[in-house]
Image (cartoon, rainbow, N blue to C red):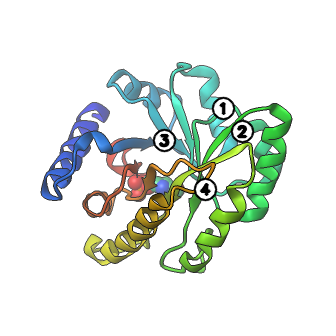
């Protein structure tokens, strides 16, 4: 079942790439396994998946202990500062850096552990009160502050678009973030490595890919409803 779901999602990603003249190799599928048991992650792993998304540090730690070491774990949920120490070194990419204060704490711990941590800045494009992240108009200042933290490397941006019935309604959100991403990339800012635009979930990933996503985070369409 999971294998078939993965194939369907991959096919839809490829079709969206074709429609927008993109190379499907530019888009990485992250299977969001939050709340799902390690057995289901294992099934997806057997089908070839290596990138998995989780929104809780405890779940990354528990699953990474029992699953293969070549899995790349993506932290996609709000990160509490008291969990940073446990997380660092266990994750390939933190998508959800949503404040300068959090970046500061990450820098301090990364310096202690003497590691370089790849991060994305989370952007609340639609300015939803229920969501974390920088507003778009704050984002450039955030980049300029955080780029100076020597143990962090900003690799791009992440957003979760509003929940909508019709994915077309989110097209503008994705366009806006892509514009900002392309603009930041073109500035070749020191100590950054802008190459990732993480946007699109089960309900809207095809539109996100058409608008430039390089990572999509898909839970329900891969593992079923939570
Ligand atoms: C849960 C979650 C997803 C996946 O959502 P689905 O709608 O199940 O695909 C993606 N991104 C974030 C940040 C999430 O918390």
Disc on res. 33: 3
- Vertical position of residue 92 compared to residue 170: above or below: above
The residue singled out by tag 4 in the image is 96
- Vertical position of residue 42 compared to residue 164: above or below: above
The residue singled out by tag 1 in the image is 90
Q: Position of residue 34 (x, y in %)?
A: 53, 45
Front disc: 3 or 2 = 2
Instruction: Identify the secondary structure beneath mark 1.
Output: loop
Q: Residues within 10 Å of mark 3 (few under 14, many from 20)?
A: many
Mark nearer the N terminus (1 vs 3): 3
Q: Position of residue 132 (x, y in %)?
A: 62, 69
Cβ at disc 4 under 8 Å from ligand 1 = yes
Mark nearer the N terminus (3 vs 2): 3
Instruction: Identify the secondary structure beneath mark 2.
Output: helix
Q: Residues within 10 Å of mark 4 (few under 14, many from 20)?
A: many
Q: CA distance from mark 2 to mark 1?
A: 6 Å
Q: Position of residue 58 (x, y in %)?
A: 69, 40
Could you tell me if the residues under marks 4 and 1 are in contact, i.e. CB atoms within 8 Å? no
Residue 59's image quarter? top right
Could you tell me if the residues under marks 2 and 1 are in contact, i.e. CB atoms within 8 Å? yes
Residue 226 visible in the displayed image: no
């Amino acid at each position: 079942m999971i294998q078939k779901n993965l194939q369907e999602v991959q096919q839809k990603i490829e079709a969206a790439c074709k429609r927008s003249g993109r190379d499907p190799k530019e888009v990485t599928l992250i299977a969001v396994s939050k709340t799902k048991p390690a057995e289901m992650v294992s099934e997806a792993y057997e089908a070839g998946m290596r990138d998995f998304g989780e929104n809780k540090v405890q779940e990354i730690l528990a699953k990474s202990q029992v699953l293969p070491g070549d899995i790349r774990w993506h932290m996609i949920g709000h990160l509490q500062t008291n969990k940073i120490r446990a997380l660092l070194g266990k994750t390939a990419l933190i998508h959800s850096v949503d404040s300068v204060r959090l970046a500061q704490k990450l820098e301090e711990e990364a310096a202690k552990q003497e590691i370089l941590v790849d991060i994305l800045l989370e952007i609340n494009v639609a300015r939803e009160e229920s969501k974390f992240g920088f507003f778009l108009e704050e984002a450039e200042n955030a980049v300029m502050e955080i780029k100076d933290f020597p143990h962090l490397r900003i690799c791009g941006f992440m957003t979760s678009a509003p929940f909508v019935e019709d994915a077309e309604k989110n097209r503008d959100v994705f366009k806006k973030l892509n514009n900002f991403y392309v603009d930041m990339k073109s500035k070749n800012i020191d100590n950054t490595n802008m190459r990732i635009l993480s946007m699109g979930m089960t309900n809207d990933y095809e539109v996100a890919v058409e608008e430039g996503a390089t990572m999509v985070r898909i839970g329900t369409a891969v593992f079923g409803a939570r």
